[in-house]
Amino acid sequence: MYNEVSDGKVVAASASVFAGPCKVTALSVRVGSADTTVEILDGGSAGTSKWKVEGPSASAKTTVHFTFPSPIGISNSLYVKITGTAAYASIAFIPKKVA
């Protein structure tokens, strides 16, 4: 069972976001350079890729928003990998309830 309330975090570099099972419901990406990519991984920096987006070319300082009506399931831990200059991501997720 999952919590009713969403949590969130902003990351400006590749980072662990949540150390446990959760569901990703939304993501906003600020494209810092044409080579920006943001990837959601399950299980740390070497984990399973669950979703990836590349920034539009020549679109520095553009923000794009994604919502997932069917949330992205994370079984182990939520990690966000970011490449590119001056990029960041804001990620919304629902943690699994602790029994």
Image (cartoon, rainbow, N blue to C red):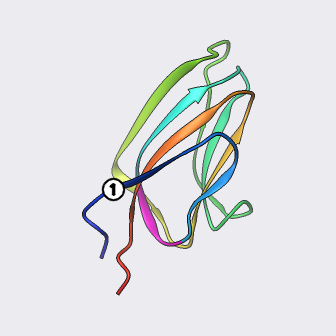
In the figure, 81 relative to 94: above or below?
A: above
Q: In which quarter of the image is residue 66?
A: top left
- Residue located 33% across and 56% down the image: 6
Q: Position of residue 15 (x, y in %)?
A: 66, 53
Left or right for 23, reference 44: left
In the figure, 60 relative to 94: above or below?
A: above
- Residue located 66% across and 16% down the image: 57
Q: In which quarter of the image is the N terminus?
A: bottom left
Kindly state the secondary structure of the residue where label 1 is placed: loop
Q: Where is residue 99 in the image (x, y as percent from the top left)?
A: 34, 87
Q: How crowded is mark 1: few (under 14 residues within 10 Å), some or many (20 or more)?
A: some
* Residue sitting farthest toward the top: 58
Q: Looking at the image, how many numbered discs can be counted on the residues? A: 1
Judging depth in this view, the residue of 8 and 75 nearest the camera is: 8
Give yes or no for residue 55 being in the magenta stretch: no
* Residue sitting farthest toward the bottom: 99
* Identity, as a three-letter code, of the amino acid under mark 1: Ser
Q: Where is residue 82 in the image (x, y as percent from the top left)?
A: 68, 41
In the figure, 99 relative to 48: above or below?
A: below
- Residue located 47% across and 71% down the image: 21
Residue interval drawn in magenta: 20-24
- Residue located 29% across and 68% down the image: 3
Judging depth in this view, the residue of 83 and 19 nearest the camera is: 19
Which SS does the magenta portion mostly show?
strand
Judging depth in this view, the residue of 2 and 48 nearest the camera is: 2
Q: Where is mark 1, residue-wise?
A: 6
* Residue sitting farthest toward the left: 4
